[in-house]
Image (spheres, rainbow, N blue to C red):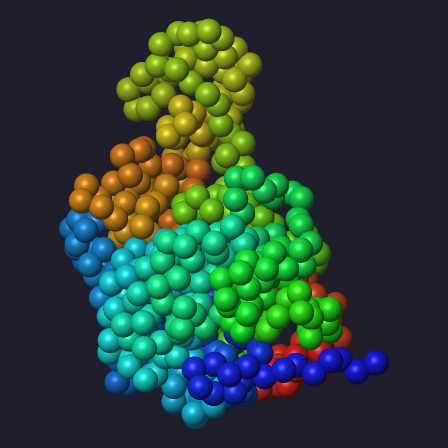
Amino acid sequence: MALKALKPLVIAGKEVLPLVEGGKGISVSNGESSGAWAAAGGIGTFSGVNADSFDEDGNLIPQLYHGRTRKDRHEELVAHSIRGGIYQARVAHERAGGEGRIHMNVLWEMAAAERILHGVLDRAKGLIHGVTCGAGMPYRIAEIAVKYGVLYYPIVSSARAFRALWLRAYSKWPDHLGGVVYEDPWLAGGHNGLSNSEDPLAPEDPYPRVRALREMMNGFGLTEVPIIMAGGVWWVSEWEHFLDNPEIGPIAFQFGTRPLLTRESPISEAWKQKLLTLRKGDVILQRFSPTGFYSSAVSNPFLQHLRDRSERQVAYATEPMGDLTEEFPVGPRGRPVYLTRADKARAVDWTNQGFTTALKTPDTTIVFETPEMAARIHKDQIDCMGCLSACLFSNWAQNEDGTTGRKADPRSFCIQKTLQNISHSEDVEHQLMFAGHNAYRFAQDSWYAGGFIPTVKQLVERIATGY
């Protein structure tokens, strides 16, 4: 039986396919990929998170930092980001050739999100039709979008989250709400919107959650505003029950993982080949991100090292108390901390294995690392350029003090460093590799047999058939 027809949507005055390229930063969805997606008739999305820019000769401008303080380096990062966002918007506009629509994706919890949005949208007028924004509660995204005459697309993982955004801010600017992205918190790649009341190990069926979102939107008079289903979408045919369904209403589908494996995708050849080999379960939901959010990434030696480090962890006290009575020396001067008897035995064992440096965490625990890795952690924390509004790893915060007021957490990592590394090198084993949980389907989908990598146009045409 043929797939129900995908009904086109009118976005910013233009009829487009209800197929959206998900924005992936850093430098993973860019002007080339998003422009190609728009040229194929859909909605292309470039990442506005520390986007790449190039000089007049086409050479990548490295994002190097020379400031002596975090705040100095933070200002450099903002300048890099605005320049890169403008560059990618121009490339996307040129590649689109007047077709489709171009969106810019930002993370609300990235550093200086508002400044970067103002900087890019002001100098790329007419090139960007919409802004998608998640990773936090982007209350002010509507006001910013309206100022520059573009549509806004909040990314939420529940009806409750949208209700809070609507009542606090969005109800003032309903005409510029282009759509609401429902991002499944268990299936989407990158950072996920799992709340404290949701079990990361117990995924829920998205249909009731999307239906609840539509019911709430209808109650606010948003019956014609489309929901964009994101996370877990591979074949549209598997979501046919969402089409022409009054409980769901106008619907579009967002693809984040599948566009990675296209010829226009800027990721490395090593990354593309890795995607073709993944098996079910190779993408895991974990909470090592310095944002504090859960995120989905490919299980590799990078993540395994973080898991191992976290397991080499014991509670301590600076004075004997309760069961913490066993003295254990830490640091260059061998100052004592107090552990339980069982934990002291474990600590001695780890030390004998070479994990001789004890690093204190904000949770009154210590983790054990090799001196070499401990030195690297310390350097990465010192080199922080303030890429997040608040960072667990370096304790940077975007405030007057420039700090969260808590100790830096050595159980995490510098997310800016590893995402820049994987975007600009062939190293896919020792860096963070975000992906959706359906990434294993590349190896199972016969369309990719023999290592076939389609153009974006071929992919969009294939998706429009339902597969």
Instruction: Please name whichever residue, 50 or 165, is drawn nearer the observer in this view of the structure.
Output: 165
Task: Check the picture and name the quadrant holding the C terminus.
Answer: bottom right
Task: Decide if residue 421 is in sight here.
Answer: no
Residue 97 relative to residue 160: left or right:
left
Residue shown at the point (51%, 29%) measured from the top left? 312
Residue drawn at (38%, 89%) of the image: 94
Residue 265 screen position, x and y as percent: 51, 76
Percent across and percent down for residue 298 are 58, 55
Q: Nearer the viewer, residue 232 or 313?
A: 232
Is residue 136 at least partly visible in the picture?
yes
Q: Residue at x 57, y 77 (%)?
A: 19
| x and y percentages locating residue 264 in the rendered image | 51, 81
Q: Quadrant of the N terminus?
A: bottom right
Quadrant for residue 104, please give it.
Answer: bottom left
Residue in the foreground of this view, choosing between 370 and 209: 209
Quadrant of the rendered structure where residue 45 is? bottom left
The picture places residue 77, in percent across and down from the top left corner, at: 25, 61
